[in-house]
């Protein structure tokens, strides 16, 4: 059976949005969108949750679940890194719209180019040797 990138995106999206495994960590105001090589999420973390723990749990649980879908996925793994940024309340709607339409954005500009320009715009130091290294 040939598995397409859309199959994988749909599976990851289903897991994140509908499996409801993250209700312990997330409040209801959550927006996810799955692209070809990354996931965007806008979450309102509960007071007891950290971004690093949330990402770890999403990656661990979704990897375990995805591997059960088909032999094709048995070697599935997420990249080791992630990025997390805070968003002011005044930008929540704009960020939600971006996430909802991220595929349109990435037709015009690659995720890598957009990510690097975002780091530069907000003066976030990084070493190119370690960005997108795995």
Image (tube, grey):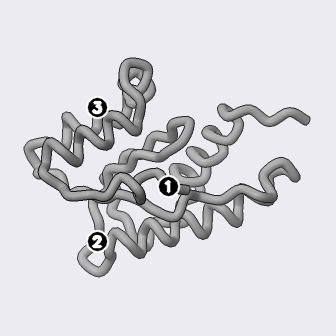
Q: Quadrant of the C terminus?
A: bottom right
In this rendering, the answer to whether 68 lies above or below 8 is below
**Left or right of residue 70: residue 128:** left
Q: Secondary structure at mark 3?
A: helix
Q: Earlier in the sequence, mark 2 or mark 1?
A: 2
For residue 47, above or below residue 85: below
Residue in the image at 80% along x and 36% along y: 3
In this figure, which residue is indicated by the disc labeled 3? 97
- Nearer the observer: mark 3 or 1; the answer is 1
**Residue 19 screen position, x and y as percent:** 59, 57
Q: Is residue 65 left or right of residue 72?
A: left
Q: Quadrant of residue 68?
A: bottom right
Which quadrant does the N terminus fall into?
A: top right
Position of residue 110 measured from the top left corner of the image (x, y, whole percent): 41, 30
Q: Where is residue 66? Give x, y as percent.
A: 71, 56
For mark 1, give the secondary structure: loop
Mark 2 = which residue? 46
Nearest to viewer (mark 2 / mark 1): 1
Tell me the crowding category of disc 2: few under 14, some 14 to 19, or many 20 or more residues within 10 angstroms, Cα based: few
* Label 3 – label 2 distance at C-alpha: 22 Å
| Spatial CA span between label 3 and label 1 | 29 Å
Describe the element under mark 2 as helix, strand or loop: loop
Q: Residue furthest left?
A: 90
- Residue at (45, 40) in percent of width and height: 33
The residue singled out by tag 1 in the image is 133
With respect to residue 11, does 107 lie above or below?
A: above
Seen as rendered, the residue at the extreme bottom is: 48
Residue at the right extreme?
Answer: 1
Disc 3 and disc 2 in contact, CB within 8 angstroms: no
x and y percentages locating residue 40 in the rendered image: 40, 45
């Amino acid at each position: 059976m040939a598995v397409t990138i859309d199959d994988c995106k749909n599976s990851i999206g289903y897991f994140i949005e509908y499996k409801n495994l993250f209700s312990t960590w997330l409040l209801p105001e959550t927006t996810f969108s799955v692209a070809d090589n990354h996931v965007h999420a806008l979450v309102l973390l509960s007071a007891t949750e950290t971004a690093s723990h949330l990402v770890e749990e999403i990656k661990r649980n979704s990897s375990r679940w995805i591997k059960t879908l088909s032999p094709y996925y048995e070697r599935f793994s997420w990249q080791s890194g992630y990025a997390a940024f805070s968003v002011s309340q005044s930008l929540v709607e704009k960020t939600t719209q971006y996430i909802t339409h991220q595929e349109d954005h990435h037709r015009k500009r690659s995720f890598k180019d957009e990510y690097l320009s975002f780091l530069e715009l907000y003066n976030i130091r990084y070493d190119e040797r370690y960005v997108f290294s795995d």
